[in-house]
Image (cartoon, rainbow, N blue to C red):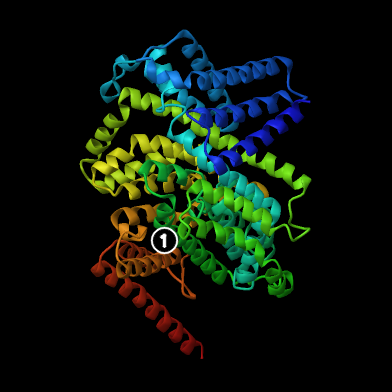
Amino acid sequence: MLKKLSFLLAVVFCVFHCWTAMFGAAPGIAQKALHLGIILIIFFLDYLAKEDRKWYLKVIDLILLVAVAGSMIYIISIDKTIDLRSGLIYTYDIIFGVLLIIALIEATRRSVGLSLSIVVLCFIAYAFFGPYMPGFLVHAGMDLSRLTSIVYLSTDGIYGTAIYASASYIVLFVILGAVFNETGVGDYFTKLASRAFGRFRGGPAKIAVVASGLFGSISGSAIANVIGTGTFTIPMMKKCGFEDDYAAAVEASASTGGQIMPPVMGATAFLIAEYLGIPYFDLVVAALIPAVLFYVAILMTVDLYARKHNIKGVPEEELPTWKELAKNVYLILPLIYLILAMSVLKMTVTKAGITSIIVTIICTLFSSKNRINLTKLKKIVRASVEGAKPVAIACGVVGIIIGVVMGSGLGIRMSAVLIEVAGGHLWLLLILTMVVSLILGMGVPTTAAYLMLALLVVPALKEMNVLPLAAHLFIFYFGIISNVTPPVALAAYAAAGVARSNPTKTGFFAFKLSLSGFILPFMFVYNPVLLMQGGPLEIIQSLITALLGIYSLSAALEKFVFKWSINQFERLILFVSALLLIVPGTITDLIGLAVLVGMFFLKFFEDKRGMLQKA
């Protein structure tokens, strides 16, 4: 009975968001409150439905469920009168506000992890004990009514920008991803990547990289991407000669990059566009070159590894045929439509998302294998809710942190301290930001990490005259890269589980493969041309030199350049070449290129000399 009720609410949740996407959002705070409220009710209802759960835990689940339902109904009922109160806070405001905060923190502990729950509790304690804090942390302090007012009743808290993006945009693309998965569109991307790259040297790893980029661009989750494509690509890589740890690492790093690959770019990209106040498609265009460079870097490293270890491609008979792919070419139309809807047709993100769902359903009607039936529809509904849960809960709970930061003025003071510690040096501020981003991102959803950093760190970057777009993408990248950064490399651990490999070694290899992801944010901060902020010739020059720099970096990492092994000194030379090509400037580019060309001729003549001596 409880499971049926949970599924019925899941259907209501999906229908509600599809309906409001087509005909306009619910008025006032209702869209955000219903979005978060229904998700939390389903969340606790699913726990109640577990047969092996102890009775006293079920009592707690029921209390939390009722608390969420009550707080949702209450906030919707008073929405129109909040602005007329002149700051008055009533007892019921405090009661329902506190109940929602408790339920959110507990949902976060269960779905996201203990780390984010502890962070939120620390911020709540900070709100109360502000007058007793040292140094720049000191503030006037808040009582319970003030905290409730900011966190529960205002648009600076739980029902702020973050949950707005989740309720308006993100959920639609979660539903779209579920539709893609069940209709075979996601699987088609994998087959397309297999046909295009499978026969080449190290083919299975290249399939993993391209397929994960395509699938990840719509899934928005590194771990979901690992499970979705890794179950197919990892065994194929192992079969062709890749080490277990390396195969898992390739999938982990490629899946992590899916969140930076346009057009969807994971959930957080919608928030960035919202914060910057720019059209979502403009953000997609700006992020295209760095995303492509990230994947090209992994492909280069994988190719050099395969060449060094003489790993062949996949046998022709094991690959899907072009005839089979041509027969199902209609499966790529929904993604093409999505891109055209946002670029050429200039649709809003909401309209592009909902119409893409409709186009996908229409495109698959003509195939009995791919069309949506009742079984697939049930899976889509469940997958949509499961995908929306962690994002909605993270956006809601981070709203508590945002409320405390805004109410205490911590964001402004934190920026001043960071600039002071960096001594006015941008490079040092960027390194500090990178470290903070990686620490906050470990074990925390990218969305939650981004929102905290956008409040605490981005103002400092802007004060140092960093382009706002570059500043937001900088913290976004490092929040994502934390998925493959030991000691808490969740994507690498998920891939290690699929490959049955050593999680620590997998994490190390994934970190190594993703090293370009650590350099790219520095590149576009110092050279915004890589974010399409310049003329065509500038963009082309920056792209070419960046590609050469990434090749030098990949060769140095693998200790193998072109078709020759290199020693430690030559490896150091290639690192220097990479840095020179990556740093913007015509002179540095020319010197870096000369070093790389010189390395080619050095190894070429060494090889010729060796062949003559053997002869």
Residue 471 falls left or right of residue 419: right
- The kind of residue tagged 1 is Ile
* Quarter occupied by the N terminus: top right
Between residue 583 and residue 335, name the one nearer to us.
335
Q: Is residue 29 visible?
A: yes
Residue 108, relative to residue 167: is it above or below?
A: above
Q: Residue at x 61, y 64 (%)?
A: 207
The image shows residue 134, relative to residue 425, as above or below, that is above
Left or right: residue 175 versus residue 115 is right
- Residue 515 lies left or right of residue 87; in this view the side is right
Total numbered labels placed on residues in the image: 1
Whole-percent x and y of residue 434?
A: 37, 44
Q: Position of residue 48 (x, y in %)?
A: 71, 23
Residue sitting farthest toward the left: 424
Q: Residue 146's quadrant in the figure?
A: top left
Q: Is residue 468 above or below residue 359?
A: above
Crowding at mark 1 (Cα within 10 Å: few <14, some 14-19, many 20+): many
Residue 101 in view: no
- Quarter residue 590 falls in: bottom left
- Which image quadrant for residue 546? bottom left
The residue carrying mark 1 is 289
Task: State the SS at label 1.
Answer: helix
> In the image, what residue occupies the spot 25% across and 69% down?
586
